[in-house]
Structures are given as C-alpha cells and as structure tokens.
Image: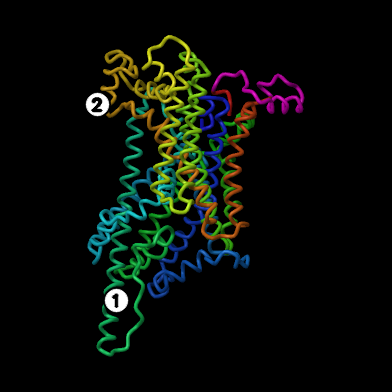
C-alpha cells in the first residue's frame, strides 16, 4: 500500500495528502529524466576520440547546445532530437526496471546502488591528488558564508533537496516499506540507517565535486598569473579568465565544471565514462523508485483492484505517460521550464506536503483521545489559537521589515514575541475550557501532547521487542523514556515533539516565506505566463488534498461499498462530503 492508505488509516480525509505526494514524485520524473538524458548524451560522446569530444573542446557551449539554454521569451520552438532519443532510452530503462514490480526493482538496486558508490570512491581518490584539491575541501567544509546562510531561501532549497534525496513526501518510503514484514522490521534502526547513509553518501559526493572545483580554481588562478607575467614582460598574452568555480551550482557543476576538470586529466574518455555512468545509474535509481510509487498506487486503488492489470501493463502506462509529459522539456524552452517546475514542486509542493504530513501525525491522529480526556472544545481552541499565533507571528516577522527603518532582526523579534504570546494565551484559554478532573500537568499533556506520534512510537518500539522477556514498552514514564534514549532501536520522546512542533512550524514558516519571496520578485525573473505552468502544478497538488478532504468517499470502490445500483447513484454516494463507514484499509 502507498502513502494514501497510510493517511487514510489516521483519518479518512487525509488520503489526499498521500495522493498529492505520489503525484508530486511522479511529476518530478518528467523533468528528472531529462537530466539523466543529458548525462546519457555525454556518456556516449565519451567514447569518441579526445579531439572530437565536444564537452572537452568547449564545455560551456556544448551544454548550451544540449540543453538549448536560451533567455525566457526568446523561444523559437526548436526540437532537440538528441535529448528526445536519449530521454526515450531512459524511459525504456525505467520500464524494464519496474515491469515486474518490486521483484525487478530489488534486483536492479543490487547494481545501481553499490556500483555508483564504488565509482564515487574512485573519483574521490583520483581527485585527492589534483593540485588545489585541498583548497576545494577547505571551501567545502570550513569556509562558510554567514550572509548566505542567513538567507531563508537557501534553507528552503536545502530542505527540498533533503526531501528529494531521502525520498520523503513522495510516497517512496511508504510504498517500499509496505512490502516489509511487520514482525521483522526494526523501524527506528531502518530510519537511522537510511538517513545516515544518505547523508554520508551526499558528503562523499561533495568531496568529489569540491576536489575538482579546487583543482579548476587553482588551474584558473595559475593561468591568470602567467597572463599577468607575460603582460609585464611585454609578451602578447590571452585575456584573463574569470575564476569563480566555487560559485557554480546545479547543472553547471555536473555538465560544465566537472567536465572541464576531467578534460585536463589523462585519459579523459575513461573518466568521462566513469563519471557520467555514475550519474546515470544514480539518476535511474531515483527515477524508477518514483515511477514505481505511482504504479503501486494505480494497482492498489479501487480501480486497479477491480481491473487487476498485469505489472507490465501498469509499468507501460506510467512510463508512457511520463515519456509524453517529458516532451515539454525537449524544446528550446526546456531548461527554463525545468527550472520553473522544479521550483514549484520542490520549494512549494514538497515543503507543503511535509507540513501537512506533520500536521496529520501530530495534530489530527488520535485527537479523539484528547477529546475524551479534556473535552473537544478545549482541544480545538488550543489547536486553532496555536496556528493563528504562528500565522500572526510569521506575518509580523516577514512584514515589519517592509516598514522604513525596521530591520529584519527587529521584525523577527516582534514576530517571535507575537507567536509566543499567542501560544501562551492558547494554553491558558484551553485550560480554562478543559473538562475532567485531571491534574494540571496531565491536562496540559492531554491538550498539548503529541498523542498520535506517541501511538506510532509505541508500535515502532514494540515491533521487534522481545515482549516475553522485556515486556511491552509504554511511553511517558521515567523508566521507559530513559530506555528509549539509551537504546538505538527505539524512538525517544523527542520524536513526537519534532513532528508536532518543530518540523511542522518550521515548514509552515518556510512556506509563507517562499510565497512572500515570489510575490516580491517573480522567480528567476521569468514571465508570468511561464511561471503559471509551475503554479498550476502546485495548485493541482493542493486541489488533490482539498478534494479528498471534502469528498473522502472518492477513494472507495462505489460498486462494492455504496449499495447503489445506478451510475448516478454511485457518483452521488462518492460526492457525499462525509467518510464512509468502512474499516480502514478498504480504501485506495
């Protein structure tokens, strides 16, 4: 089962969050395969003679030719046949990877995961012997720019990259984990292994990149010194180069800076094959996992369960649709559209989905337990006032600096004070309205606690526990929480706090900051008609969430559950804005 069912098991109206996450991950593959296609072109070109490899002779111009990069508004509708053919090949490979379901992907990752890691280690070892590699490592690990780090946009982009790298908020983790056996899955250990290995590989990749950037920066500076010496000596010399390799990012790193470095090494063809082959394997690995998530959804939804299509048929459908959608990016407008769509999916969509998932687990799941302890009114008042305080504080924080003479720090201070003051009011009012005879501390926990997250924590911590000898793990006692802190195979009490308060609030604030930044200055300076494409994709994701929130029955099989005989009656049943009285797990 995919993320949709996970949301439905918490509340029938939350399935739309999972639906939006699956769609977002699938939409990413439409343009992500284009990047893999570029790597495929570079790989094929690496088999040519050194003198005829275009990314060696002129890397900047070659990438411009491949991506057909052009200024927004200057498009001529030119079709790139090289990218089209390469993209088609990549989609065929993705189809072959998922045509037999999880069984085929299991075999594929045995090669696409360890082999790129081995290649990465080889590249790091080779790069360590290059002149300037040490300076590159210093820029990577030591030389930080405080001004850049204070920019909220950087953190927003970083969160989007982490979400993509880990595969969270896209249904991937839920899809693959659903195939595990519950009694044999150590969730806390799996979480640590996945997050730490992902971070570790990302750090390794940074070493490989910055070693090469340091080498290219050093080569550029040496060249400029030679030019200056020749000019001083009265010898004709070439113009100096601009040495700003550390300022390069995104596709410029993989397709301009790194190829420039490879071109100066011995046997550049070999290193080109190694590097671009690594990119393709890593890219295919990520792409087919996202496509497999959509395929799993189609097989598990009520339409798929009724039709029972073969795995290869579903794989062909999602691969074919992905290929057709990718045609948007093979024209001369492709690079601009890729940048726009990536911005709205990753920096708007993924962060919004992450916030909604935190809200689902921290604020909605098991809310009935809170009602029973202190009354429905008290809980709803606290939840409402908390988010109003957060909204008001964020608006003050990002709005006050627009007033002349008000600095950003002052605005942030006022915003934080408004939020904390409103939060205290929410606690006081909810306590006054609370019911029951619980002690003050127990009442505050009943109102403010992370009961849904604790429920998940109990299930995870007891999943592989030997209850015969150790007994059941129960949360919120000194002994149990000390044990959870001590053991690496348990979630500690901070698990719930991070979900309900820290992550939820952080993603909420970043969402508003992203909206504010795009209102202040249209993203990338692109025309509104182009930005509308990315905005429409984001709006569609939001509509998926709202549609299921209002009409939760559309996720159920109306033929099986409605009791209606006519098509009109079944449609009317699906559009009834109240959940169906059906056991969790029967839905899509």
Q: Is residue 573 magenta?
A: yes
Q: Quadrant of residue 231?
A: bottom left
- The disc at residue 569 is none
Question: Residue placed at 48% from the left, 51% from the top?
Answer: 403
Tell me where residue 458 sits by quadrant. Answer: top left
Q: Secondary structure at mark 1?
A: helix
- Residue 155, compared with residue 499, is above or below; it is below
> Could you tell me which quadrant the C terminus lies in?
top right
Residue under circle 1? 223
Number of labels in the image equals 2
**How many residues crowd mark 1 within 10 Å: few (<14), some (14–19), many (20+)?**
some
Nearer to the camera, 145 or 245: 145
Q: Residue 304: x, y in percent?
A: 61, 32
x, y percentage for residue 137? 26, 57
Per the rendered image, the range of residues in magenta is 559-584
Q: Is residue 136 magenta?
A: no
Do tag 1 and tag 2 residues touch (Cβ < 8 Å)? no
């Amino acid at each position: 089962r995919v993320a949709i069912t996970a949301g439905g098991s918490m509340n029938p109206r939350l399935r739309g969050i999972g639906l939006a996450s699956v769609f977002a991950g699938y939409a990413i593959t439409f343009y992500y395969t284009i990047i893999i296609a570029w790597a495929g072109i570079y790989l094929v070109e690496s088999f040519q003679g050194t003198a005829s490899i275009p990314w060696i002779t002129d890397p900047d111009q070659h990438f411009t030719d491949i991506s057909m990069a052009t200024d927004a508004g200057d498009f001529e509708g030119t079709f790139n046949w090289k990218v089209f053919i390469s993209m088609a090949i990549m989609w065929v490979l993705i189809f072959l990877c998922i045509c037999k379901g999880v069984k085929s992907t299991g075999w594929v990752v045995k090669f696409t995961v360890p082999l790129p890691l081995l290649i990465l280690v080889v590249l790091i070892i080779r790069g360590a012997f290059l002149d300037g590699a040490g300076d590159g490592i210093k820029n990577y690990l030591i030389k930080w720019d405080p001004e850049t780090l204070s920019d909220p946009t950087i953190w927003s982009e970083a969160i989007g990259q982490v979400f993509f790298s880990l595969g969270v908020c896209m249904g991937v983790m839920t899809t693959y984990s659903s195939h595990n056996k519950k009694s044999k899955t150590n969730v806390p250990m799996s979480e640590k292994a996945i997050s730490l290995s992902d971070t570790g590989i990302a750090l390794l990749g940074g070493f490989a990149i910055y070693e090469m950037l340091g080498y290219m920066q050093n080569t550029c500076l040496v060249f400029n010194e030679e030019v200056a010496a020749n000019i001083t000596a009265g010898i004709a010399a070439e113009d100096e180069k601009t040495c700003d390799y550390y300022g390069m990012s995104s596709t410029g790193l993989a397709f301009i800076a790194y190829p420039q470095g490879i071109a100066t090494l011995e046997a550049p063809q070999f290193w080109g094959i190694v590097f671009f082959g690594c990119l393709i394997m890593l890219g295919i690995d990520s792409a087919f996992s996202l496509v497999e998530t959509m395929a799993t959804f189609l097989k598990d939804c009520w339409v798929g369960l009724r039709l029972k299509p073969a795995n290869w048929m579903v794989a062909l459908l999602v691969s074919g649709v992905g290929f057709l959608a990718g045609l948007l990016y093979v024209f001369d407008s492709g690079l601009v559209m890729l940048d726009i769509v990536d911005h709205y999916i990753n920096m708007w969509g993924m962060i919004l989905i992450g916030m909604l998932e935190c809200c689902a687990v921290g604020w909605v799941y098991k809310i009935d337990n809170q009602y029973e302890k202190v009354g429905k009114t008290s809980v709803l008042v606290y939840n409402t006032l908390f988010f109003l305080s957060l909204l008001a504080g964020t608006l003050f924080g990002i709005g006050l600096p627009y007033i002349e003479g008000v600095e950003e720090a002052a605005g942030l201070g006022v915003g934080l004070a408004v939020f904390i003051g409103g939060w205290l009011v929410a606690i006081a009012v909810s306590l006054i309205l609370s019911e029951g005879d619980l002690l003050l501390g127990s009442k505050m926990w009943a109102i403010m606690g992370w009961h849904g997250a604790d429920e998940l924590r109990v299930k995870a911590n007891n999943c592989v526990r030997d209850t015969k000898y150790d007994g059941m793990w129960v949360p919120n006692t000194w002994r149990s929480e000390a044990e959870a802190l001590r053991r690496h195979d348990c979630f500690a009490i901070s698990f719930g706090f991070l979900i309900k308060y820290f992550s939820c609030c952080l993603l909420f604030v970043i969402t508003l900051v992203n909206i504010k930044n795009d209102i202040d200055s249209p993203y990338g300076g692109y025309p509104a008609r182009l930005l509308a494409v990315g905005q429409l994709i984001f709006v569609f994701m939001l509509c998926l969430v709202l549609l299921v929130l209002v009409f939760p029955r559309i996720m159920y099989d109306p033929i099986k559950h409605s009791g209606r005989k006519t098509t009109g009656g079944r449609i009317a049943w699906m559009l009834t804005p109240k959940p169906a009285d059906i056991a969790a797990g029967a839905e899509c």
